Image (cartoon, helix red, strand yellow):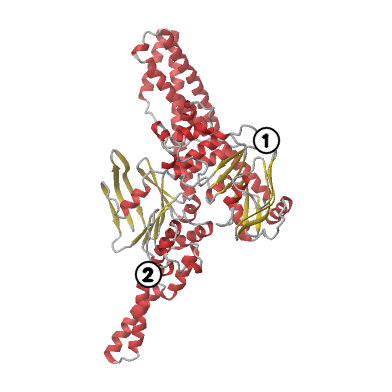
Amino acid sequence: MILSCQKITKSFGEKTVLNQINFLVNEGEKAAVIGINGAGKTTLFKIITGEYEADSGEVVFQKGSSYAYLSQVIDVTSRRTIYEEMVDAKKEIIEMEQQIRQLEHDISKQSGEELSQSMETYARLTDRFEKSNGYAWKSEIVGVLKGLGFTEDQFDTPIYTLSGGQKTRVALSRILLVQPDIILLDEPTNHLDMEAIRWLETFLSNYRGAVLIVSHDRYFLDKVVTKVIEIENGNSNVFMGNYTEYAAKKKAQRDAQLKQYLNQQQEIAHQEQVITKLKSFNREKSIKRAESREKMLQKIDRVDKPIELNSKMRIRLEPEIISGNDVLTIEGLTKSFGDKHLFSNLNIEIKRGEVVGLLGANGTGKTTLLKIINRHLRADAGKIAYGAKVTIGYYDQEQHVLHDNKTIFEEISDAYPKLSNTRIRNVLAAFLFTGEDVFQLIGTLSGGEKGRVSLAKLMLSNANFIILDEPTNHLDIQSREILEEALASYEGTVFYVSHDRYFINQTATRILDLSPTGIVNYRGNYNYYLAQKEAGNIEADSDDLTMAKEEIEVQEAVSSKEDWQRSREEAARRRKRENELKKAERDISRLEEENESLQEEINLPENATNVAKLTELSKKMEENEEKLLELYELWEELQSEE
């Protein structure tokens, strides 16, 4: 055991954020802390590091162990250069090396007992130096800095002149070079491109010490961690395995509980119907049988319904009209900014129903390309043609489509003036803005809150061609999965830029890889793209890359394309079934809540003598009960398809 958190509890005012949190991190173990935004993950890290004090509970580190912490906010004002900061991280090794050099000098002049003592010290120091990889400290510094995206011509840059993201990478580089017994990382991939993230995955997977990570990057967690600590409603649960294994176990756990609950509810509804029918016969025997059944019903040990988080965003994307088959055609597109050349002679075709992910290193012009397509920028050369009946919905990662001086309510009502106030409030509630929240100014919102407003506008657009620029930025894992589900059931066309590899893997039907030499097409998701690129099966050496040539290259590279297509269709079928299941569950919850409200209204004193009102309310409850029975049957039917 390197770290133990025992019954950690923390409240802010009346809100309990962490309640009896318990987990262990063993030596060399890689673990993740996950939960929705606001679950208390960063608070937990600050308690572990001593920045916050827990209300109760205990944090225990192994005696003599060391730790390092990378927070989300880095404020470094050092006058050192990047390289000097890394050298300082290795000062213990450097001082040891200086001692060894001095001993070598002294030994050459010594004899007798003095020489014997120096030789003993020299042997001890050199052994320790070798075990600490002392001979490679310079190459280690260069390797870490380059791995995290710094070029050698940046090594002499003063740290105080760097951007926030660059300072975070410097802080991470230093931590990796210090090599403590346990590293605590809070969103370490936020300021890294895909190559740097892949390098960090390899480094952490091979790291001798333990690692505790908070991250929304599910692909990163899959590659690195072997334990997941979930914080939900203030409580902790520990799952062995990576993120995908956790998600499967969590779903199975919840499905089993929900199935048990729904089966019991169905049986209760059936018994209540039988009791009502028996009583309606109005005979002594039938009434006794009804009373017997009622007693049995009262003795049932009721199964609790699985907790539904009230912070769950709800998004549904539906095109108002269907576009033509040809959605977007780009020919010979070229763009530069002054001396900075981004791309030239790009040729792209996107067809109806495709979900196309645009990848490429930072600075290749991905966001610029989206802005040109969306008419927010002009190209230097080339043609863009939109297909018949194409309507565009745009999600901008910089949130330039929002107005800082407007309230959330005004942002929606001004964009969609025909919507009623009730409809606007309902839509905003689906994106977690309720009550007085809707009157907050856009300029005062966090990045995540602005992202939810933009998604609300996107949903209301009813567009059939959605363009997304980093849509998962600022979204927690649960919200990312909700967006993935919405895209899976969307009947329009999608073109997006994202660094979220898990999101790409779940949603993309095709990937375009943009580089200074051109663009290459891969007909598959992220795993497929990565496998083909690493195998070198497709070359990006053609200025005029036609769709036909791309398809031939892919077919030559992969003999099992048909198998892949079948597996994709099966995955789509499973996603559709899961979406229908979730809809049935939502409808069941809604009708149950509605019936509770109707019953409360029936019980109001003012309605006791209002026969018309009581008849109306009772009729509505009966209609809901009939719908519930149908929904229970539908749910059971869908569940049995697995």
Q: Is residue 220 above or below residue 633?
A: below
Q: Quadrant of residue 124?
A: bottom left
The kind of secondary structure element at disc 2 is: helix
Whether residue 249 is visible here, answered yes or no, is no
Q: Determine whether, in the image, residue 112 is placed left or right of residue 555.
A: left
Query: Residue sitting at 40 percent across and 11 percent down?
Result: 287
The residue labelled by disc 1 is 389
In front here: 246 or 342? 342
Give the x, y percent position of residue 341: 62, 59
Point 34% across, 76% down: residue: 95
Badge nearest the viewer, 1 or 2: 1
Residue that mark 2 sits on: 88
Image coords of residue 318 (percent x, y): 58, 34
Marks 1/2: CA distance?
Answer: 61 Å
What amino acid is at disc 2? Asp
Q: Quadrant of the C terminus?
A: top right
Rendered image: mark on residue 106:
none
* Crowd class of label 2 (few under 14; some 14 to 19; many from 20; radius 10 Å): some
Residue 531 can be seen, yes or no: yes
Name the foreground residue: 575 vs 88.
88
Are dots 1 and 2 in contact, CB under 8 Å? no
Rendering coords of residue 513 (x, y %): 62, 54
Q: Which is nearer the N-term, disc 1 or disc 2? A: 2
Q: Is residue 195 above or below residue 349?
A: below
